[in-house]
Amino acid sequence: MIWLALGVAVLLWWLMTGLALMSVHQPLKLKKPILVGSAVLAVLAVLGVEGNAAAHTTVATIAGFAMALLIWAFLELSYLMGYITGPIKSAARDDMPLHKRFYYALGTTIYHELLVVGVVGLVCILGAGLPNPTIQNTLAVLWLMRWSTKLNLFFGVRHFNSDWLPENMRYITSYLKAGENSWFIVFSTTLAAFFTYLLFFYGQIAVEPATTLSLFLIGWLAVLAVLEHCFLMVPMGETALWRWAEAGGRKSGR
């Protein structure tokens, strides 16, 4: 079961990350239909939350994991394409004190943060009390690790590939600090690794196969999120994993 979860998690993570990178670098005339298509899939996934959460089978678990990723894909695209961001759409000044830079950095994304809270909250309500919480738990892990990544980028990391951002969103790099790792990335990565261990521990002792698979899927997703934190700490040539997507996006964006 653990190897099935590894294969599903890695394949979907690699493929959907690549498609997202390709999508955000498309010309405006293609971005809108891509976002609309992503929104339709996300809405269908949300409508299916209750039915999926009620089915406690391995097939439903894998489907729920994929549905959560579809919902998350829309949320990410809506921000990275620049459609749902925040009231601040300009670069930070060099003389900004830390507290003000944090306030303005939050202002670049606050509308999107509220959207994420609303969608994740709605999914949790729809699936509450049902035996298959894969969608809710997957979204919760993605949400927490996304916030960890954002805070790390704000406080300081050694490596960040700003080329993955589309031109219209490059202003947010002025709120980030690249070049040296802060204490927070070591702390957050260690904490995330510990909770990842707990997911695998409880997956090993789970009695029902669907529960085991669900915990392993989310556990491998957490491993990948920890790995992404490591990419921020030390350059590892991770861009090679999605060179096909970046090349496709640049070519289409011309």
Image (tube, rainbow, N blue to C red):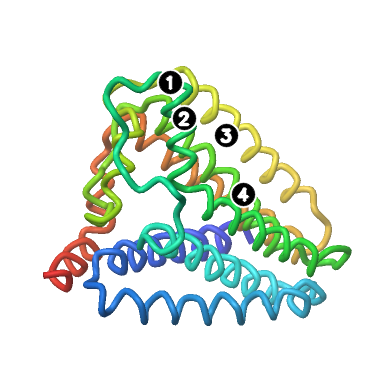
The answer to whether 23 is drawn above or below residue 144 in the figure is: below
Front-lying residue, 75 or 183: 75
Eye-nearest disc, 3 or 2? 2
Which residue type does callout 2 highlight? Phe
Quadrant position of residue 85: bottom left
Residue 3 in percent (x, y) is at 55, 59
User: Under tag 4, what secondary structure?
Assistant: helix
User: Under tag 1, what secondary structure?
Assistant: helix
Residue 158 in percent (x, y) is at 30, 27
Residue 248 in percent (x, y) is at 19, 69
Q: Are marks 2 and 4 in contact (CB under 8 Å)?
A: no
Which residue type does callout 1 highlight? Leu
Front-lying residue, 55 or 159: 159
Q: Which residue is mark 3?
A: 193
Residue 254 in percent (x, y) is at 11, 70
Eye-nearest disc, 3 or 4? 4
Query: How far, Cα to Cα, is label 3 from label 2?
Result: 26 Å
Query: How far, Cα to Cα, is label 2 from label 4?
Result: 23 Å
**Residue that lies at the very extreme toward the front in this rendered image:** 87
Quadrant position of residue 94: top left
Residue appearing at x 53%, y 54% in the figure: 111
Q: Which residue is mark 4?
A: 141
Image quadrant holding the N terminus, namely bottom right
| N-term mark: 3 or 4 | 4
Q: Are marks 1 and 2 in contact (CB under 8 Å)?
A: yes
Q: Are marks 1 and 3 in contact (CB under 8 Å)?
A: no
| N-term mark: 2 or 4 | 2
Residue appearing at x 17%, y 69% in the figure: 253
Q: Which mark, by number, is residue 98? A: 1
In-image side of 11 versus 235 (left or right) = right
